[in-house]
Every structure is written in structure tokens, then in C-alpha cells.
Image (cartoon, helix red, strand yellow):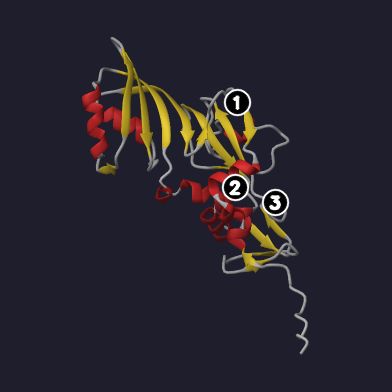
Amino acid sequence: MAKTPEPPSSPEAERIAKFLARAGVCSRRDAERLIADGRVKLNGKVLDTPAVKVTAADKVLVDGRPIGAPEPTRLWRYHKPTGLVTTHNDPAGRATVFQHLPPDLPRVISVGRLDLTSEGLLLLTNDGELARRLELPSNGWVRRYRARAFGRVTQEELDRLKDGITVDGVRYGSIDAKLERGGASNAWITVSISEGKNREVRRVLDALGLKVNRLIRTSYGPFQLGALEIGAVEEVPRKVLKEQLGKDAFD
């Protein structure tokens, strides 16, 4: 007996916040804030709730700018210099990372942040859902830094950080810190963390009597800064993405 033909499938619908995240506008949480602030229009009408599904056929605007359908997931390594804030719009008018990216780069967001005076590896993606996934402490990815700090410290003191430490009421988990070399006034320390709390490396080392005066992120999970020049951007090959993140990251 012949099967009854199935009706043609309609464009796949998804929540508006997820749509905006996958389009690289922002994270899903920030998309919900944009909607609450009345900055998102769907087919000519201002949205007042994120409980709406859209398809590629819908017309979506954010701050009056049209948002196209999400493109295939991409990831870039960026060597952030000091003096740039990791935000799209800075209320204080400071220079931002996104103002200094190559003009041919699509709309991207960062995976986590590096503060104004920090430098090194910053991952960029056009997929807000991927950014959120890579930021979660539950993925167990290690962030590795090289810190130059004013002051003296012993390896024994650094080893105690493996048991975690509480600073100003904030509990930090296990930290692996290795003294590369120490001098009369400055020490170079390699620090590996997996939580990535705000200014974690600086605050933890400060609790040991060290004042960080240079901080370079050298790796984020399996992705390395390597020999990437300051200010340079390099895309991670799609084959490498699939190997490191799994095919599920591209569904």
C-alpha cells in the first residue's frame, strides 16, 4: 500500500532569542534584554515578549538594522592588544575590540571577555549559542595565562591555590600556578583556571601580595594563541571545529 505523501515542510521555526543569538547579534540572554527594551521588530511590529518563534522568511530588525538568517557557525582566534574593551558599545567612549576588527569580518561576538589592560587570545564567533556554550564552566575548558606581577612569591605558596581560595567573599576553585621565574621585583607566573570568574587571575594573585602589571591569555580550551601577531585575526578551520566541538555544535 502506497504511503500518503507528506505535506511540504515549512521553514524551521525557532525562538526569536535563539535566532538572534545564532545570527551573531548577541547571547540569548542579551537578546531577551533587547526585546524587553523594545529594540527588536518582527515584521514591522515592536516585540514585547521573547515567546515568539520566527523563520528565515520573517523580517527581523534590531535597532532598525535588518538581521539576516543565521549563517554556518564560524570561529576566529584574535590576538587582543591592551587598551581595548571587549564590548560593542562602551558608555565611556573607550575604544572597543569590535571597532578594530577587519572590515570584511561578519557580525561577531566574543567568547567571554578580556579586560582593558589584558591581552592575548580572544575567541570570536558569529554564533551566540556557541559562545554561550564555550563560556560555561561545566565544559571544563582550561584558560591559561602568563602573568607578570610585582612582588615575590614561592612555588609553595602558588601550590596552595590547587585547593582553591576565597577572596573578598568570592570562592575560587582549584588553580594551577607555576612560577616561571622570579626576580628582585617582578615574577612571571603561568596560571591555569577553569572557572573564568571576573578578573580572577588578578584578584587571586593580589591576595598573595602580587600586583599584576601584565596579563596575557595564551589558550582557551584547545585553542592556542601561538604565534598570532597582536591585532591579527585568523579563522579556525571548520574541520578543526568539528574535531574539537563535535558535530552537535553545528546542528
State the separation of the CA atoms marked 3 and 2: 16 Å
Nearest the eye: 58 or 131: 131
Number of the label disc, if any, that sits on residue 129: none
Q: Looking at the picture, how far across and down is residue 195, in whole percent?
A: 37, 43
Q: Circle 3: is it few (<14), some (14-19), or many (20+) Cα within 10 Å?
A: few
Nearest the eye: 114 or 224: 224
Residue 133 visible within the image: yes
Q: Residue at x 68, y 67 (%)?
A: 12
Return the residue at label 1. Answer: 231
- Disc 2 or 1, which lies upstream in sequence? 1
- Disc 3 or 1, which lies upstream in sequence? 3
Secondary structure at numbered mark 1: loop
- Disc 3 or 2, which lies upstream in sequence? 3
Left or right, residue 215 beside residue 106: left
Left or right, residue 112 beside residue 46: left
Q: Looking at the picture, how far across and down is residue 89, in whole percent?
A: 57, 40
- Quadrant that contains the N terminus: bottom right
User: Which amino acid, by three-letter code, is at mark 2?
Assistant: Lys
Secondary structure at numbered mark 3: loop
Q: Residue at x 54, y 48 (%)?
A: 245
Nearest the eye: 6 or 41: 6
User: Which amino acid, by three-letter code, is at mark 3?
Assistant: Glu
Left or right, residue 107 beside residue 81: right
User: Which amino acid, by three-letter code, is at mark 1?
Assistant: Gly
Q: Circle 1: is it few (<14), some (14-19), or many (20+) Cα within 10 Å?
A: some
Residue 43 position (above or below residue 192): below
Secondary structure at numbered mark 2: helix
Return the residue at label 3. Answer: 71
Nearest the eye: 250 or 123: 250
Return the residue at label 2. Answer: 242
Q: Looking at the picture, how far across and down is residue 183, in whole percent?
A: 30, 11
